[in-house]
Image (cartoon, grey):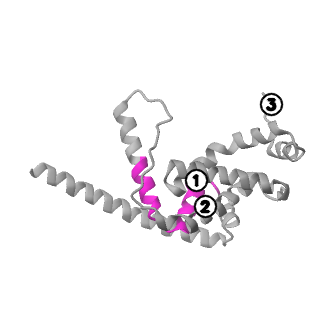
């Protein structure tokens, strides 16, 4: 089956073809939802944020100039919407809010599925502890597979700053994970002594 390029879909959507708009949204909705979920750590808020991102895309699609890839431009919109989310809502939310992750992949071993889900939950909780800028760099590098140049362009920073923020975030994540492992070990040894 022939897959239409983003540029063709954008042209058709701008010309008023509803099916082109739907195809464009469907192409990116999973990536945008996962991005939003990792940023806000809550399914309902991620859905609201995804909707807000696509509304912003709909309103601003005519401004896309194809000077850079569409995906990068779309995630730049997502980045700004996430920043707005944090400005408006974040002070009212607890870092203890944990997403209810669903295992979309089928597995023959329920124990492995549970273990993977628990690891993902811990990782998302730990990423939530990072400062917003570092969290965005981690998201773009590891979950969106962006290059440092793409990250720098999307966030309006230099490539070296993007690298520095990523390495700083990785150092913090390592410390958080070590603290988590230590806490888990202490809790396990307390249970063993009881």
In the rendered image, residue 161, in percent from the top left (x then y), is placed at: 60, 73
Q: Tell me how far mark 1 sits from mark 2, CA to CA.
A: 7 Å
Q: Which residue is mark 3?
A: 2
| Residue range (magenta) | 120-146
**Residue shown at the point (37%, 38%) measured from the top left:** 114
Question: Hey, which quadrant is residue 174 in on the image?
Answer: bottom left
SS category of the residue bearing label 1: helix
User: On the picture, is 40 further left or further right than 109?
Assistant: right
- What number is the disc on residue 36? 1
User: On the picture, is 88 further left or further right than 176?
Assistant: right
Q: Say whether disc 1 or disc 2 marks the residue closer to the N-terminus.
A: 1
**Residue shown at the point (42%, 61%) measured from the top left:** 95
Locate the N terminus and report the quarter of the image it occupies: top right
Residues tagged 1 and 2 counted as in contact (Cβ below 8 A): yes
**Residue shown at the point (26%, 59%) measured from the top left:** 183
Q: Is residue 144 visible?
A: no
In the rendered image, residue 14, in percent from the top left (x then y), is placed at: 87, 47
User: For the image shown, how many numbered marks are present on the structure?
Assistant: 3
**Residue shown at the point (62%, 46%) measured from the top left:** 31
- What number is the disc on residue 82? 2
Q: Tell me how far mark 3 sits from mark 1, CA to CA.
A: 29 Å
């Amino acid at each position: 089956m022939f897959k239409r390029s983003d540029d063709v879909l954008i042209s058709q959507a701008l010309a008023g073809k509803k099916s082109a708009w739907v195809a464009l949204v469907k192409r990116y909705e999973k990536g945008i939802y996962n991005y939003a979920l990792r940023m806000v750590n809550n399914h309902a808020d991620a859905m609201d944020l995804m909707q807000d991102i696509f509304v912003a895309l709909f309103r601003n699609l005519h401004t896309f100039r194809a000077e850079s890839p569409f995906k990068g431009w779309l995630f730049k919109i997502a980045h700004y919407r996430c920043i707005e989310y944090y400005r408006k809502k974040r002070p009212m939310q607890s870092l203890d809010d944990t997403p209810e992750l669903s295992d979309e992949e089928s597995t023959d071993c329920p124990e492995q599925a549970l273990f993977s889900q628990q690891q993902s939950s811990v990782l998302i909780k730990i990423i939530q502890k990072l400062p917003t800028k570092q969290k965005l760099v981690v998201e773009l590098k590891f979950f969106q597979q962006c290059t440092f140049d793409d990250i720098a362009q999307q966030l309006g920073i230099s490539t070296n700053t993007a690298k520095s923020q990523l390495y700083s975030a990785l150092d913090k994540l390592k410390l958080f994970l070590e603290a988590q492992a230590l806490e888990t070990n202490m809790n396990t040894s307390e249970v063993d002594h009881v």
